[in-house]
């Protein structure tokens, strides 16, 4: 049997596509600017192999021109243009990408990388325009052509005239309706903001005539109207610049401009990876906790760019929860994007990048801990709790990654210490890493249980945060040393050994102990004489794994 071809109702298909691919209308501008940038890149590629063609960067730009009176928005580029056949094939066939074909013919070089690949972005113009008119003149031709469409009903192509090589795209912006506003796409401030958001790092200038009012120079209280051509985008992204060219202020400005936070970050991390994974990233460790950090409302994530074009504002997959405080961006060329370019397919490349980033953050935090203790402690004050949760969560899967980043208060000099510092100064006869938990350092120091250990000259970790002891229990041993609560039954100290036998005092006062056991029955397991008390008459101790402090927290938890 002869094979039948599928017939698509292209009118419906186009409508469906336009209204279902993109979640935000403003994306149309990103798509048209990306196409213009691709068109200029193509001349750049041609020039690499064609001696007749010189690529003089100053001649290439993209212009965005709103016209409120006529309700049009025109995007012009000085790129490679389209012939009649190109218009037919690339704008007349949905899901046919001239750029993808071009990319396959021309290998990417020195950071130039064509953006287009799906052959649908252009049609996003119909989200905001009733009529789209394309006037284009291809490189090497004197004849221009005009393509015009109202979306659903197909298109027309006819000869036209155009002075220079390149493409003008004229959008007749829709009228406002009750539900949808379109006027904003004629407003130069709004347009400028959209360009900044998605296309700031397009490598050719995006020019706009911007009008406004500003204080008049040299006179007080007077204003003047102005109209000037501005280049809206910053073009060279800071992450593509050489680290040696950049000063700490440049990173700080970037942090502020991006509104990652209102604080001053304690550290920036600039990564240019070109080994097994290729990406650039600029990451920041903030100093202060965002107000919603320890709530469900907080969303972790990094900005994700593909080739300098913003894809996602907060890509959560790039950060493990325990480093959820990190801010910044990642730019990579070879991501598998979904068709709207608003999301990613689950991507091996992405998980490789995420892994790489996590280990980089860890090593940078460790070096901060080692080299700038003050800054690290400032950071730890804000996010230490997060790290301890990280140790405890996921059944302790990440404890090896995180344990060296933890700090606890200690009996020694009342300072914060790391586990490594603790263990490295343990006397030889000390068996365990001791800790005591309580509401505050003050209260812990008054615990009778701490006395014996402190008297031996052993350091004690003071756990004052709810999560501390849970994290410690999860770590279990550090450098082969077990953790031991000072209120545990077995402290591994001499006096303790003696404690195991019934002291003479108890036998001598059997009646008293019987009476106390009787009175406290059901409240404590046993009242017994102990050798571990120095100046206090009595203390509480536990036998199992769960200490008194943990019991308190567990009881307070909603079940
Ligand atoms: P994609 O960019 O993913 O290829 P689009 O629907 O955005 O898909 O564009 C389809 C094709 O139309 C492009 O691949 C390109 O060949 C052509 N095209 C679109 N805009 C322009 C332009 N401004 N200049 C030259 N060619 C263009
Ligand atoms: Mg495109």
Image (cartoon, helix red, strand yellow):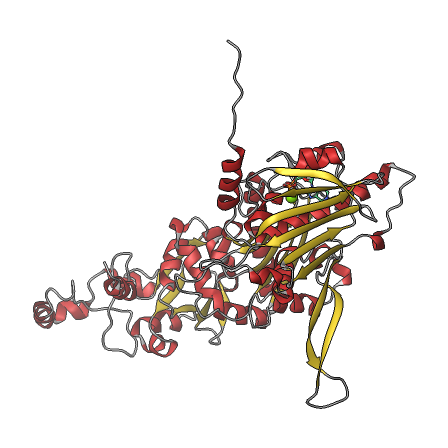
**Could you tell me which residue is drawn at 41 percent across and 65 percent down?**
294
Please tell me whether residue 445 is drawn above or below residue 318 in the rendered image: below
Please tell me whether residue 251 is drawn above or below residue 173 in the rendered image: below
Q: Is residue 524 visible?
A: yes
Please tell me whether residue 490 is drawn above or below residue 253 in the rendered image: above
Please give left or right for residue 463 compared with residue 39 in the image.
Answer: left
Total marks placed: 0
Please give left or right for residue 181 compared with residue 525 in the image.
Answer: right
Q: x, y percentage for residue 424?
A: 52, 61
Residue 303 figure quarter: bottom right
Residues 420 and 220: in front is 220
Q: x, y percentage for residue 213?
A: 68, 78
**Could you tell me which residue is drawn at 23 percent across and 74 percent down?**
538
Q: Residue furthest right?
A: 52
**Ligand 2 placement by image quarter:** top right
Q: x, y percentage for residue 134?
A: 69, 45
Residues 26 and 93: in front is 93
Please tell me whether residue 459 is drawn above or below residue 40 in the rendered image: below
């Amino acid at each position: 049997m002869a094979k039948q071809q599928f017939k698509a109702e292209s009118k419906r298909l186009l409508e469906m596509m336009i209204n279902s691919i993109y979640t935000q209308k403003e994306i149309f501008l990103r798509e048209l600017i990306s196409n213009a940038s691709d068109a200029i890149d193509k001349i750049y590629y041609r020039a690499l192999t064609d001696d007749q063609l010189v690529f003089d960067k100053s001649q290439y730009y993209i212009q965005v021109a709103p016209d409120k009176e006529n309700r049009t928005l025109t995007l012009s580029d000085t790129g490679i243009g389209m012939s009649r056949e190109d218009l037919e094939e690339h704008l007349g066939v949905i899901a046919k990408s001239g750029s993808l074909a071009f990319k396959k013919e021309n290998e990417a070089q020195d950071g130039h990388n064509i953006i287009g690949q799906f052959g649908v972005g252009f049609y996003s113009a119909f989200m905001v325009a009733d009529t789209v008119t394309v006037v284009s003149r291809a490189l090497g031709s004197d004849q221009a052509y005009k393509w015009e469409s109202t979306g659903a009903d197909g298109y027309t192509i006819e000869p036209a005239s155009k002075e220079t090589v390149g493409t003008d795209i004229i959008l007749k912006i829709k009228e406002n309706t009750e539900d949808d506003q379109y006027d904003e796409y004629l407003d130069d401030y709004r347009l400028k903001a959209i360009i900044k958001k998605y296309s700031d790092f397009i490598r050719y200038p995006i020019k706009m005539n911007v009008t406004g009012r500003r204080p008049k120079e040299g006179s007080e209280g007077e204003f003047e109207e102005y109209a000037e051509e501005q280049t809206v985008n910053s073009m060279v992204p800071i992450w593509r610049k050489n680290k040696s060219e950049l000063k700490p202020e440049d990173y700080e400005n970037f942090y502020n401009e991006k509104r990652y936070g209102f604080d001053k970050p304690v550290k920036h991390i600039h990564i240019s990876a070109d080994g097994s994974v290729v990406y650039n990233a600029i990451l920041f460790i903030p100093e202060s906790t965002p107000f919603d950090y320890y709530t469900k409302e907080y969303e972790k994530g990094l900005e994700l760019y593909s080739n300098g074009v913003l894809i996602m504002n907060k890509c959560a997959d790039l950060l493990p929860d325990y480093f959820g405080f990190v801010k910044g961006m990642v730019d990579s060329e070879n991501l598998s994007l979904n068709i709207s370019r608003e999301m990613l397919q689950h991507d091996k490349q992405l998980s490789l990048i995420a892994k790489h980033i996590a280990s980089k953050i860890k090593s940078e935090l460790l070096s901060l801990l080692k080299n700038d203790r003050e800054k690290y402690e400032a950071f730890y004050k804000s996010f230490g709790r997060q790290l301890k949760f990280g140790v405890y969560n996921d059944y302790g899967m990440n404890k090896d990654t995180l344990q060296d980043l933890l700090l606890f208060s200690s009996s020694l000099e009342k300072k914060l210490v790391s586990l490594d510092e603790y263990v490295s100064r343990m006397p030889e006869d000390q068996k365990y890493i001791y800790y005591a938990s309580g509401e505050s350092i003050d209260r812990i120091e008054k615990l009778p249980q701490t006395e014996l250990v402190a008297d031996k000259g052993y350091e004690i970790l003071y756990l004052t945060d709810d999560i501390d002891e849970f994290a410690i229990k999860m770590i279990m041993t550090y450098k082969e040393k077990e953790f031991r609560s000072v209120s545990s039954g077995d402290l591994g100290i001499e006096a303790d050994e003696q404690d195991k036998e019934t002291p003479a005092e108890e036998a001598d006062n059997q009646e008293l102990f019987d009476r106390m056991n009787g009175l406290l029955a059901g409240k404590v397991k046993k009242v017994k004489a102990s050798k571990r008390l120095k100046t206090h008459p009595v203390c509480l101790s536990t036998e199992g794994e769960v200490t008194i402090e943990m019991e308190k927290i567990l009881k307070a938890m909603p079940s």
